[in-house]
Image (cartoon, helix red, strand yellow):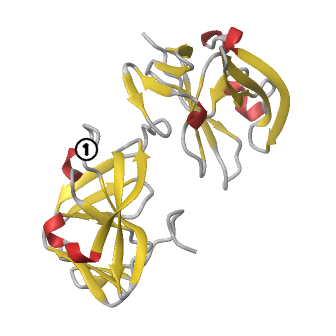
Amino acid sequence: MTKIHKPQHCGDNSDHWVDVEESPRRVHVVFGGETIADSRHVLLVREAMRVPVYYFPKEDVRADLMVATGNITHCPYKGDASYWTVKVGNKAADNAAWSYLEPLVECTAIQGAITFEWGKMDAWYEEEEEIFVHPRDPYKRVDVMQSSRHVRVVMAGETVAETHRPRLLFETGLPTRYYMPKEDVRAELIEPSSTTSRCPYKGLASYWSIKVGGKVFKDFVWSYPNPIPESPKIKDLLCFFNERVDAIYVDGELLAAPKTHWSLG
């Protein structure tokens, strides 16, 4: 049985924290057709204002595919990071792996463990399921609930969408999102975009732009045509960025525009 360690809280800075714990999941990484790391004792590192990261015990990493670069960067919370290039045949990912060989005393739990730059790898797996973007945080929840609230979206003086049957998505640390049936959105005011994005909790998103008042507001709306099995309730529904549209009214009450990394300006 895998031993699960209690999270180690690195440092006592109230503005920043780093938690380290052993994950119960087997995690493996593929690059250039080779499994370069495979561990049943991977460390999940959660850090304030950052997405979770997997660190592998060095004995679970293919050392023969790693070339030291001599590069070092300093993190004020973890210490000095040393870097490696991952090389498989003629394919290489420069400075794509790093480790804290002598971390700050508060973060000794990650000493010698190795992580990889997510986007430079070909694929990541938890058990036998491919995962995308970054590890899912076990302390983060995504709940979707059917609602009868009256939701109205306004842009440039036009009501773009209005529904009494939204599905409300509650995601830890983020604004409530209001997903609505396509039939309740004015089709003549939105147009498909070529933009896509991935969410580790929901899947692959497609985007729409709002066209109203002679202007196009790019990628203000998104949908998950085929969400991952954990989020089936939002399939094919449309959602508007609270941060970007002029107004969203819920039961007649104007919502305050949240400030997130999706905000404009």
Q: Locate the N terminus and report the quarter of the image it occupies.
A: top left
Q: Is residue 133 left or right of residue 249?
A: right
Q: Is residue 73 left or right of residue 57?
A: right
Q: Locate the C terminus and report the quarter of the image it occupies.
A: bottom right
Q: Nearer the viewer, residue 144 or 215?
A: 215
The structure residue drawn at horizontal position 39% and vertical position 19%, both measured from the top left corner, is 127
Res 149 → quadrant: bottom left
**Residue named by callout 1:** 226
**Percent from the top left, x then y, of residue 259?**
51, 70
Q: Nearer the viewer, residue 230 or 2?
A: 230
Type of the residue with mark 1: Asn
The structure residue drawn at horizontal position 53% and vertical position 72%, both measured from the top left corner, is 264
**Percent from the top left, x then y, of residue 26?**
45, 18
Q: Nearer the viewer, residue 150 or 205?
A: 205
Q: Secondary structure at mark 1?
A: loop
The structure residue drawn at horizontal position 25% and vertical position 84%, both measured from the top left corner, is 159
Residue 45 is at least partly visible in this image:
no
Q: Is residue 4 left or right of residue 92?
A: left
Q: Nearer the viewer, residue 142 or 106?
A: 142
Res 14 → quadrant: bottom right
Res 174 → quadrant: bottom left
Q: Residues within 10 Å of mark 1 (few under 14, many from 20)?
A: some
**Percent from the top left, x then y, of residue 182?**
18, 65
The structure residue drawn at horizontal position 51% and vertical position 65%, both measured from the top left corner, is 260
